[in-house]
Each structure stands twice: as structure tokens, then as C-alpha cells.
Image: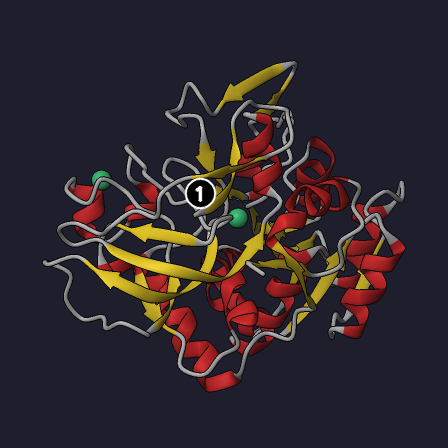
Amino acid sequence: MRSFQVCQCGAPLQCTEQPTPKPAGSEVLLKVLAAGVCHSDLHLADGYFDLGGGKRLSILERGMKLPVTLGHENVGEVVAIGPQARGVAIGDRRLVDPWMGCGECAVCRRGDENLCVNPSSIGVFRNGGYSDFLMVPHPRYLFDIGDMPPERAAPLACSGVTTYGALKKVGPTLSTDPVVIIGAGGLGLMCLALHKAMGGHSAVVVDIDPLKREAAKKAGAMAVFDGGAPDAAAQIVAATKGGAWAVIDLVGSSATARLGVDSLIKGGKLIIVGLYGGDITLSLPLFPMRAITVQGSYVGSLTETAELLDLVRRTGLPPVPVTTRPLSEVNAVHRDLRAGKVIGRVVLTPA
Ligand SMILES: [Zn+2]
Ligand SMILES: [Zn+2]
């Protein structure tokens, strides 16, 4: 099988040929039908996250081993099943939940494998879907997609469940007050679509790129603002009539997190999702005095993926623009994504 792998951090992915593996135990082998390209793949290819102040978080030191095949937004067709794998049949088309933990600790048993301290996520710590075939360790990570087109369903595994998990953290004000979404890339448009599907009141979308603001406006944003404007926070506070109850920061840079905090009303919450990198300094007395919350949100649990698929079955697939490109063009897609040239999501299909 052909796979596109990180062999050296900071270098283009390399196409490697290996024998197609055979599933053992509870493993399931899928032929990849669609593999979404996520912005975090760029960080994984670089090998680090920017912590701000010149500090870096090395993904290799966190357990990523090279070479590794990227790709964590996958839909595949079951082509081989290990002797202990139950509940799947050859020919089934399944969405793969990539956010795997050790499966044995208290956190995993509670159902929060995405928060396991020993993660083994697909496309990060084990081989992902930038490949002809993908091995999944257990059928519990596989979700039926019915007759959804694979390239439309694939982004649900990261972009979908990540924004769904963040939107759930907003709480009861989701249906009564505007939510501010910072970042109108693939994640932003997904967030906007799911916000509507979840019965969200209205959304204010912030992006520095006028084309992305336009896309957000078309997708139903109540208002769009340029996050780079000197009075961006004042504009958001005015649009939300005194400040936002919830800001979802899908960028996660020093500038966007600062803007997020400055846009909150007393009692409001900033939910940081994006991994762009950076840092901010916050005055501690303002936490109690403004009663604000700053919360991180990392992908989603298996339960949240199941809930998301139920939501999508009821309300339809999120209308996020999806472009398909052949798997062999993955390095060109990464370059486009780095240059900010991608509207919506690019999904690779092995041709
Ligand atoms: Zn992702
Ligand atoms: Zn665990």
C-alpha cells in the first residue's frame, strides 16, 4: 500500500510503499475512501506547536514516532476483519473516530479517550488515512455513515466533533444569545453550520481575511468583523449588546485569545480550540471581578461523535464547502493550507 508519511519534521511528506497489513485480534482494516486535510496536520508535519515566548512543544517528545502516516479525518470501507472484531462486516462504510486513548485507564473507561494521558490517536501516534489502507485497533472507533458521501462525512471526525465539543461547552446561552466564532476557515464554517443545527441563537464571526468573512456571511453569520481592526473588541461588544457570553476561538493565537477575553461580558466564557500558538497575560483580579471563564476544548469523545452523527442524520450534513483532491497531491494541499488559500475543507481521495 501507498502512504504519505512524515519521515523528517519540517520536510514534505514522503510517499512510501509497504505491504498491506492484515488485521489481528480486534483490528479492522479499511480501504480509505476519503481523508480530510486538517490544519493541525501542518503542525504535525512541522513536529511542534508554538507555545509563545519562543517556546515550542515538541510532538516527537510527546510520543509521535517517525515515520508516521498523517490523516485523522477518515472514512473507509471495511475490507478485512480480525478474528475478535465484532459488529462490522466486509463492505461496511465507516467514519473512523481517531481520538484514541489507552482504552484501559479511568479516563478512557469513563468514555473520554480523547483526554487520556497516553493518547494513541490515528494520524498522530499511529498511522492515519493519507494512505490506500488504514488499520483501526477496535470496531468501537467505527461509526456508520449510512448513505452520506464519504468526502462530506470525513471532516466530521475532527473538524465536526471538535466544533461540536466546543459548542456544547457554551451551555444554555447557546439558544438565547449570540456566540462569537473567531476563525472562518474550514473549522469556522463547520462551527457555524453545527451551531445552527444545534438550535443556536445567532453567530458573530471574526476573521482577518475578507474572503473568509464573506463565506461566513453567506453561511448565515449574523455579523462578521475583521479581527485585525484596532476596535475589533468594541465592535463585537456592540454587536452582542454589551459583550459575548461565549467566544469560541478556533485560531488560538495571542491576538485572537486577547480579542476573545476583551469581547466577553461579565460571566462570559472563552473557549480555546485552535492550536495556532502564542501566549497572553491576563490580570488575575479580572477573573473574579468579571467572573470570566477561559476553557480549552480538545476534539471530542466517542459519545460526542455518536451524538454528532445523530444530529447530522436529523438535520443534514453541514453545508461546508468540500474540495476533493487526489491523495498524491497532499504536499500541494499542505502548501495551499499554509498560505491560507483553502476555503472550507480539502478531502483527499486515493485515485
Ligand atoms: Zn484535525
Ligand atoms: Zn486511557
Left or right: residue 168 compared with residue 325:
left
The residue carrying mark 1 is: 123
Residue under the point 42% across and 18% down: 61
Residue 180 is at least partly visible in this image? no
Give the quadrant of ligand 2: top left
| Numbered disc total | 1
Determine the image quadrant of residue 229: top right
Figure coloring: secondary structure
Residue 227 is at least partly visible in this image? yes
Q: Secondary structure at mark 1?
A: loop
Residue 349, x across and y down, in percent: 57, 61
Please state which amino acid type lies under the numbered disc 1.
Gly
Left or right: residue 43 compared with residue 314:
right
Q: Nearer the viewer, residue 24 or 271?
A: 24
Q: Is mark 1 within 8 Å of ligand 1?
A: no
Residue under the point 89% across and 56% down: 210
Q: Nearer the viewer, residue 347 or 98?
A: 347
Above or below, comparing residue 326 to residue 143 in the picture:
above
Left or right: residue 197 compared with residue 147:
right
Residue under the point 34% across and 46% down: 114
